[in-house]
Image (tube, rainbow, N blue to C red):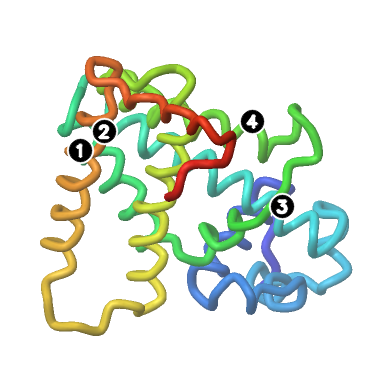
Amino acid sequence: MPRAGLDPATVVAAGAALADEVGFTELSIGRLAERVGVRGPSLYKHIASQDDLNRRIAALALAEAADAIGAATQGRAGRDALAAAAHALRDFVLTHPGRYSSTIGVTPTGPDDPIAVAERRGLGPFEAVLRGYDIAPQEMTHALRALRSVFHGFATLQASGGFQWSADRDESFEWLIDLVDRGLRSTSVASPRPSPVPPMTGRRPAP
């Protein structure tokens, strides 16, 4: 039955839901048109192309994840905030695996691109978490990359069925949070990392 009142936001939301259901790589204009009850060409009144649809879904997913993480960390600090952010990201990935996949490897076209705007929103809660650990400003980028790597990595592995051993996944995730918490506390400005002393020979020190 044809759907009345389609607009870009409705089409993108339907595309995101379909991606979660069938997988992002299986999302196509044809499948989406069938889902919303119109012919394929009719969708081009609302989106420019498959790539446009994909990028709009990515922007939506990044914004939704940012909102979820921000709400989870509100009023929290230290390990409590870290755990809330980690669980919010993991829950989002597991609940919305298709739309989250659209965000991987997508490149903003500029600072005003909705993808870039949503990415900055998503970094905000994690930056707040890190400020609670007194991470030095010059190390903030490294710390943000570390958080993204460990929590994104765990969540996407779990979403793709990558954990086959019998050990409880929730226990493993809490173990990971504890590991990151200890690492961040040891890297705070209260105990700065010593700078390596250059050798007299001018050669780089051995790793």
Q: Which residue is drawn at 33% across and 19% down?
A: 131
Measure how far apart labels 1 and 3 are at the Cα level: 34 Å
The foreground one among 36 and 199 is 199
Secondary structure beneath dot 1 equals: helix
Q: How far apart are marks 4 and 2 (CA)?
A: 27 Å
Instruction: Check disc 4 and give the amino acid type.
Output: Val
Q: Name the kind of residue labelled 1 in the image.
A: Asp
Q: Residue furthest front?
A: 201
SS for dot 4 = helix
Q: Which of marks 4 and 2 is in front?
A: 2
Q: Which one is earlier in the sequence, the residue at label 2 or at label 3?
A: 3
Above or below, 42 relative to 203:
below
**Side of 171 where 117 appears, left or right:** right
**Mark 2 in CB contact with mark 1 (< 8 angstroms):** yes
Q: How far apart are marks 2 and 3 (CA)?
A: 33 Å
For the residues labelled 2 and 1, the Cα–Cα distance comes to 5 Å
> Which is more N-terminal, label 1 or label 4?
4
Quadrant assignment for the N terminus:
bottom right
Q: Which class describes the residues within 10 Å of circle 1: few (<14), some (14-19), or many (20+)?
A: some
- What residue did someone put label 2 on? 184
Identify which amino acid the numbered label 3 is placed on.
Answer: Arg
